Image: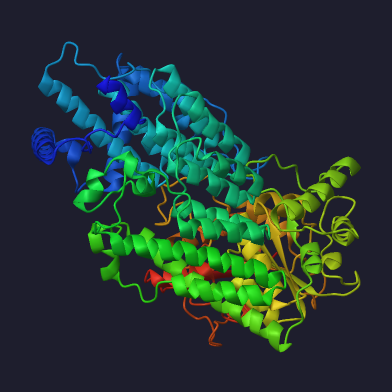
Amino acid sequence: DSSLSAAARCPRAMPKRKRRPWLSEDAANAANANASSKASARRERERAFREAHPERFNDEETDDEKNARRDARAGEARAHGDARDGSALGSFLDVGAPRERRRGGHGRRARDDAGTTDPTTLPTHAPCQTRDDIDAQEFERRRARVEAVTREIGTCARHKQLARACEMFVNLVSREGLVPSPYTYASLLNAYVNTGTMDGAEALMERMRDVGCAPNVVAYTTMLKGYMLVANVDAAWRTLNGMMHNRMSPDSRAVNTYIRVCVRCGNLQMARRAFDRMRDWDVVPDATTHKLIGRLLAQGLKRDELKALIKRTVKGEHLRWTKDPSSGPCQFWRAGKCERGVNCRFYHDDSIVQSDARVREIESNDTLASMYVNHAHASAISGDVKQSKKSLRKAAEYLTENVTAEALTVGGLKDKDERAELFRQTNRDELKLEMRRIEDFVERLMSGKQQPPKLDEHLSRSLIFSSRLFEEVPERGAKMSSEEVDALRDNLYAALKDTMGLNDDSDGSVKRAIRKVIAKDGTIRFDRMFGRSKKEKRELNVEVAAGNGDWAVAQAKTDASADWISLELRHDRVYSIFSRAVCSGASNFAAMGGDAAYIMRRYVASESVSHVFVNFPEPPHHSGDAAADNSLALLNEEFFRDIHACLRRAYTSTDAPGGLTIFSDNQRYMQALARTLAELDIFTARDDVDLASGAPANQYETIRGVRLYQGVPGPSAGHRVYEQSYFDRFWENGQHVDRYFISLVRK
């Protein structure tokens, strides 16, 4: 049967409107012409609809006018009690749903609009839009309108405006009587995920099933991204398996998103499980997959396994259909460009020149360079300097030098998103910096200027708490039972073995050190962490959301009279901080991982910290949009109260009160933080603030009594030496050169 043989040759259906490789070139050209004609007709219908309803497409309308118009519509609906949309809209907007707790659990500020974002109160609708009782023109009008609203919801999702996205969805169903598509739901789901409202996202997935709109691959991948943001690897694995249970195979993007969850949590075991099952899912590992797995293997010091992975990648052993001539020729490849890459189901003839060949070469080189740098790093901190130098030489061979913007535009692949393009270029620059850092470390070891690192000592000062967000946090000062303290110590020790490469602790020295660092009440003994006497009075400075730790390492090297800690949520960054601690050889620097909101509340004793630094905090939205909402945002009233409780008090005139310094490039966000700090009234201004240049900080604005300075903070604000962090370099590359800071002390 020819139909059966064709199905056997094509096990998975190709996306709609894609050209079938088994069609002749004339048929394919005719299909393309037909598709182009349909697209032109659709644009004409959309133009006509826009002209007929200009009030719905008023580009000149300001945000305030839009908000006022929405409020007026909602108020009118509630006032008149419209049977079709007023009751449904009113019940959704006014529902008294329990308020969701913010990051950190107990005591966190609740979302003010929690009642407007409860998915269980969304209006019901038909499973899909049918053509029954409507003509073709009306069907196309409805379809075009749903697509337009879907794009608007997507914009709200990107700006983290959940309440607005929900209101648009409700209006679409209740007021306009239209049926949302699976992509409309996916856009709304993205709004829940981007704001950290994972309970709402899970409820929306259930809602989709209830109304008969089955979640698609986009929806599942969005959920995986959400679990990545809250570092919930178990829920992410259940989601990945849920796709299979719903007869939906994950694609490469879904698998890579899941592995990113594992990278953020440092869970090599779970990443291996997904990597090993990719062949069963008919997914070929791509460049992103290899980068992520290589990173995890290096963090676990699995050097032999990483080396074997690099060899398989170079040989292309992971490739399947694209290297098998029996798969049949890919017509896209024959035409000069196949966007499916290594996951295309058809043969790619290497003799055919591709329009994006240069871009793919750059991507391949960057991937192998990244894997070799990771291998060099793992070898260096393990003491194998010869292997480290060899891997660095291989990385240098693959790393593309002086990649110009013109090279990236070959084949039309230049990313229209300037932020994403900036991110890729910054990562390439960071890779070069990492190579130089490892080279310098190896040279110091070989010349005898620095002693070989003692990993056990550095691991004994590294505390890796859970990266999970939204855990219930007890009140400050609440007592932990002896069983809870023992469990905490065991978990910290297990984290070093599972995620940081602690392979040999036969004498139990690391385990004993961890037990000593955690006091009987569960708080951290920082004096024991650094091997100090309890009577020894030293400054203890903590950088929160530390990124890669560059800034804190520079401060520790400059001021050896104080102890420094970098605290970071993401495990991959925690490992970068640990690496810098090892390579610097500084005994007054340590890495800590976990949710700062949880750690500062539960594990840091009162009045134990001299200064807290926050450099380049992430705003609710990168634009500083006041309407944005983000449950993942760290800097809120409760966190500032926890910082205040941790800072040392000045009991005499000679004592220096604990300080807080926040440094950023985002003026609008810093103004908002200044207002929050002013309302709390638990900090006071610092006298004689200076800049990194040594000049007095005379340029500032006063916001309700809090000074917002312009410039780079200097020694009086706690910055011993100027050092660019990763985020500083990232935003500087993006032409964000203005800097602002707040410097306060505890009242």
Q: Is residue 85 above or below residue 717?
A: above
Q: Is residue 200 above or below residue 709?
A: above
Q: Quadrant of the N terminus?
A: top left
Residue 40, quarter of picture: top left
Residue sitting at x 30%, y 46%: 64
Whether residue 705 is visible to the viewer of this picture, yes or no, is no
Q: Is residue 103 above or below residue 38?
A: below
User: Which is nearer the eye, 173 or 456?
Assistant: 456
Q: Position of residue 277 (x, y in %)?
A: 55, 38
Residue sitting at x 45%, y 36%: 250
Which color mode does the image show? rainbow
Q: Quadrant of the C terminus?
A: bottom right
Q: Position of residue 23 (x, y in %)?
A: 17, 35
The answer to whether 180 appears left or right of 371 in the picture is left
The answer to whether 451 appears left or right of 206 in the picture is right
Q: How many marks?
A: 0
User: Which is nearer the eye, 103 or 465?
Assistant: 465
Q: Position of residue 96 (x, y in %)?
A: 52, 25
Q: Position of residue 613 (x, y in %)?
A: 63, 67
Q: Residue furthest top?
A: 133
The answer to whether 246 appears left or right of 328 in the picture is right
Whether residue 584 is visible to the viewer of this picture, yes or no, is yes
User: Which is nearer the eye, 397 or 91?
Assistant: 397
Q: Is residue 554 above or below residue 139?
A: below
Residue sitting at x 52%, y 56%: 312
